[in-house]
């Protein structure tokens, strides 16, 4: 038999999916390009420039897991989807509960119920 899914394992997959989405290149409008020539900089100019963050691309396996996790959200309703993705982004419970208009315990219960629904569906398959 396969892996036994739990709400915690599903939450970990959603967090990984969120991190993978953040690593993907930005979506740009097709048809626009830059016609300016490349600027040649001296060694001194390069030394004085601010360091740019390193761009790390996700692996093919991470993208596959992202696609798999994205399919799971169709098993829960829209409010639960928003809650699950918001929590995967590590938004604090205080902000989530304020947005939902309930206390933190109720928001946590709704999140746990959504994850449990997904875990039950995965275990049934």
Image: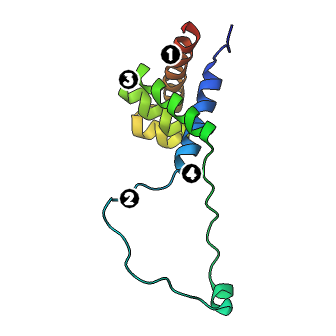
Residue matched to label 3: 77
In this view, the residue in front, 25 or 74, is: 25
Tell me the distance, in whole angstroms, between the alpha carbons under discs 3 and 2: 30 Å
Whichever of callouts 2 and 4 sits on the residue coming sooner in the sequence is 4
Tell me the distance, in whole angstroms, between the alpha carbons under discs 1 and 3: 11 Å
**Is 125 positioned to the left or the right of 2 in the image?**
left
Q: Which one is closest to the eye, mark 2 or mark 4?
A: 2
Is residue 106 visible in the rendered image? The answer is yes
Q: Which residue is located at x 60 percent, y 21 percent?
A: 7
Residue matched to label 2: 28
Secondary structure of the residue carrying tag 4 is helix
Q: Residues within 10 Å of mark 2 (few under 14, many from 20)?
A: few
Is residue 89 visible in the rendered image? The answer is no
Residue matched to label 4: 23
Tell me the distance, in whole angstroms, between the alpha carbons under discs 1 and 4: 28 Å
- Proximity of marks 1 and 2: CB atoms separated by less than 8 Å: no
Residue 71 is situated, as x and y percent measured from the top left of the image, at: 46, 26
Secondary structure of the residue carrying tag 3 is loop
Residue matched to label 1: 117
What label does residue 10 carry, if any?
A: none
């Amino acid at each position: 038999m396969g892996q036994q899914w739990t709400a915690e394992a599903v939450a970990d997959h959603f967090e990984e999916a969120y991190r993978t989405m953040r690593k993907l290149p930005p979506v740009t409008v097709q048809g626009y390009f830059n016609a300016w020539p490349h600027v040649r900089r001296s060694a001194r100019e390069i030394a004085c420039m601010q360091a740019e963050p390193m761009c790390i691309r996700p692996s093919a396996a991470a993208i596959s897991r992202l696609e798999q996790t994205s399919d799971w959200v169709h098993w829960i309703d829209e409010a639960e989807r928003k809650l699950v993705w918001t929590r995967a982004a590590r938004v604090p419970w205080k902000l989530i509960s304020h947005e939902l208009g309930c206390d933190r315990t109720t928001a946590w219960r709704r999140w746990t119920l959504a994850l449990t629904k997904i875990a039950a569906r995965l275990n049934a398959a």
